[in-house]
Image (spheres, grey):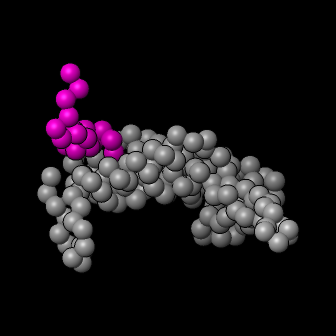
Amino acid sequence: MEEMSEGNGGGNADTFKEVLFSHLRRITNVATNEMRGGYYSTMVTKSGGEKDIYVPDTRETYCNGVLCLAHISIHKFDAKMKEKWKSFNEISAKLEKTFIDKSSIDEEVILGEGYYKDPKDQILLEEYRIKKLRLFQSLFLSLNKLFGRKNWMEIENADFD
């Protein structure tokens, strides 16, 4: 696999394959945990006080990771993946528009869950996030199929016989 030379700044040169495997590992670590919404948890501090901390929405973390993986590999997309990418973007835009149009908040982007006080909006947001997760899972599957077609998933010097 060719080395990535642009933008390396003289640091350790990683091959495209190494970057790919590293990112796949991160996404897999997220995907093997429960996919749940974000929430606040109260922690006791060393001084005995309490502090609220936000535990991130693992669905959003997963989706962000898959999107980043697509962006990393977009320059290597074949014709089949380019078509999947186009379809993904169209469906994603439609999902977002549908949510924004149905929400009682007059915004052009989807906000964090704290902005949606109306129970109907909260249900709508949860439905949106579930559909979004399924869409990104489909994108992840398509990316992995691309990697297989390109033989990027082969482990060098591995003998599994």
Query: Dividing the image into 4 quarters, which one contains the C terminus?
Result: top left
Residue 121, given in percent of the width and then of the height, sits at 75, 56
Magenta stretch prevailing secondary structure: loop
Instruction: Please state which of residues 68 and 15 is positioned toward the viewer in this rendering.
Output: 15
With respect to residue 145, does 20 lie above or below? Answer: below
Residue 9, given in percent of the width and then of the height, sits at 24, 78
With respect to residue 93, does 6 lie above or below? Answer: below
Q: Is residue 47 magenta?
A: no
**Which residue is outermost to the top?**
161
Count of numbered labels shown in the rendering? 0
Q: Which residues are magenta?
A: 143-161
Residue at 51%, 43% in the rendered image: 31
Q: Quadrant of residue 11?
A: bottom left
Q: Quadrant of residue 13?
A: bottom left
Residue 93, given in percent of the width and then of the height, sits at 49, 57
Instruction: Please state which of residues 51 and 132 is positioned toward the viewer in this rendering.
Output: 51
Instruction: Please state which of residues 66 and 128 is positioned toward the viewer in this rendering.
Output: 66
Left or right of 18? Residue 142 is: right
